[in-house]
Amino acid sequence: MSSTRKPTAKSDSSKPGTKASEMSKSGVDQDLIRQLAALLKETDLSEIEVETEQVRLRVARQIGGSFVSVSAPAQAAAAAAPAAAPVVSDAAHPGALTSPMVGTTYLSAEPGAAPFVTVGSKVSVGQTVLIIEAMKTMNHIPATKAGTVVKILVEDGHPVEFGEPLIIVE
């Protein structure tokens, strides 16, 4: 007599290297994150964003390394977030001077020289407040309004993005 045996269903999640074993508790594919981070490094991009119906995944590089941001669908995120007081960012400040380009900021005309402006400096419209180097060209950035520099938001020799706030003049 031959006995008939039904095959038992085994979950692939017990095998290393399968998709189920590489998913975190939040349902995010860890392997995908690693691939996106490697792609950032390989292509010298600053960020990559992938969005599906279930999850939105953003991998971005900063000076010190990489970070990952994962968020739920917009409806769930809006429902889960508690009501908070609105925060006015430096970019929304009416006296914010924003970067007209991507590049590297320099607060003085040359290394070791006095900076164009410091906190408390009085500036007039058109006065150079810093330099942004882009594609080996030094671009003098002028003040767009007259007043007193109350905050310098960038550091000498650091990169800036288009639209990033540079200084605040009141």
Image: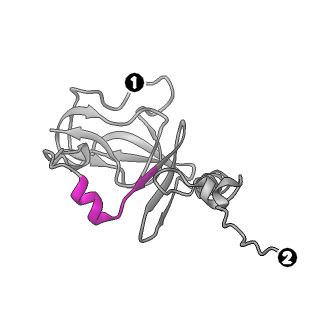
Residue 35: name its quadrant: bottom right
Residue found 63% across the figure and 57% down from its top: 13
Q: Is residue 78 magenta?
A: yes
* Residue sitting nearer the eye, 130 or 101: 101
Could you say which is closer to the camera, residue 20 or residue 93?
Answer: 20
Q: Which span is picked out in magenta?
A: 69-80
Q: Report which quarter residue 72 is drawn in.
A: bottom left
**What residue does disc 1 label?**
114
Residue type (three-letter) at the residue carrying disc 1: Ala
Secondary structure of the residue carrying tag 2 is loop
The picture places residue 161, in percent across and down from the top left corner, at 42, 51
Q: Position of residue 90 (x, y in %)?
A: 24, 43
Q: Position of residue 44 (x, y in %)?
A: 62, 53
User: Which quadrant: the N terminus?
Assistant: bottom right
Label 2 amino acid?
Answer: Ser
In this rendering, the answer to whether 97 lies above or below 56 is above
Asked if one can make out residue 44 in the rendered structure from this viewpoint, the answer is: no
Q: In the image, is residue 23 part of the stretch drawn in magenta?
A: no
Q: Is residue 71 left or right of residue 93?
A: right
Marks 1 and 2, the one that precedes in the sequence: 2
Pointer 1 and pointer 2: residues touching (CB < 8 Å)? no
Judge by depth and name the residue closer to the eye, 38 or 63.
38
The residue under label 2 is 2
